[in-house]
Image: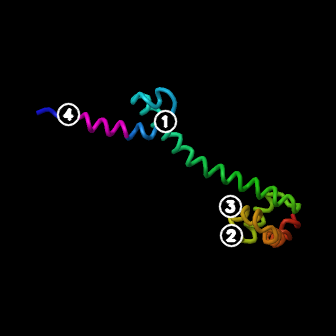
């Protein structure tokens, strides 16, 4: 007796087609094009999950640079002074403090400011 794959194939295709919701034209209707589009979307999603980390780090650095320059200190010297003083705050935490708690951030800058002023 031969194996009929109609229902199995239908369910597999249906599952992949559901991932292509919102796509246009044949990328939504023709299974071969749907499959190509969904695989390519998966590749982009994988790559962009890694890019997201870079993008956010860049954003934190930009925010920190702006906040520190307001207080008359270049970003690179500020980071070096933090390292020299063994302050264990990362860029994400520092940028959040700079936005939401400006007084606290000012104290952090003042704590490392003497080290920056000497250079």
Query: Mark 1 touching mark 4, by CB under 8 A?
Result: no
- The residue tagged 2 is 88
- Tell me which corner region of the image, top left, top right, bottom left or bottom right, holds residue 17: top left
| Disc sitting over residue 108 in the figure | none
Q: Position of residue 77 (x, y in %)?
A: 81, 60
State the residue at coordinates (52%, 43%): 45
Which residue is most to the left? Answer: 1
Predominant SS of the magenta segment: helix
Residue holding disc 3: 92
Quadrant in which the N terminus appears: top left
Q: Which residues are magenta?
A: 4-14
3 vs 1, front mark: 1
Which callout, 1 or 4, points at the residue further toward the start of the chain? 4
Labels 2 and 4: the sequence-earlier one:
4
Is disc 4 placed on a helix, strand or loop?
loop
| Quadrant in which residue 102 is drawn | bottom right
**Is residue 11 shown above or below 104?**
above
Is residue 3 placed above or below 57 in the rendered structure? above
Q: Is residue 39 left or right of residue 93?
A: left
Tell me the element at label 1.
helix
Measure the alpha-carbon separation of dots 2 and 4. 63 Å
Is 10 one of the magenta-colored residues?
A: yes
Q: CA distance from mark 2 to mark 1?
A: 40 Å
The disc label shown at residue 4, or none: 4
Label 3 near label 4: C-beta < 8 Å? no
Measured Cα–Cα span from mark 3 to mark 1: 32 Å
Q: Residue 104's x, y, as percent?
A: 79, 72
Question: How far apart, in angstroms, are the residues tagged by discs 3 and 2?
Answer: 12 Å
Instruction: Inspect the magenta stretch and tell me whether residue 98 lies in it.
Output: no
- On the image, numbered disc 1 is attached to which residue? 40
Secondary structure of the residue carrying tag 2 is loop
Name the mark nearer the viewer: 3 or 2.
3
């Amino acid at each position: 007796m031969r194996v009929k794959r109609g229902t199995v194939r239908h369910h597999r295709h249906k599952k992949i087609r559901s991932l292509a919701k919102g796509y246009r034209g044949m990328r939504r209707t023709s299974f071969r094009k749907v499959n190509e589009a969904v695989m390519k979307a998966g590749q982009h999603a994988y790559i962009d999950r890694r890019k997201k980390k870079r993008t956010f780090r860049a954003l934190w650095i930009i925010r920190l640079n702006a906040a520190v320059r307001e207080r008359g200190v270049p970003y690179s010297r500020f980071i070096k002074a933090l390292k020299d003083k063994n302050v264990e705050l990362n860029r994400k935490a520092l940028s959040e403090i700079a936005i939401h708690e400006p007084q606290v951030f000012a104290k952090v800058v003042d704590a490392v400011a003497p080290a920056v002023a000497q250079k």
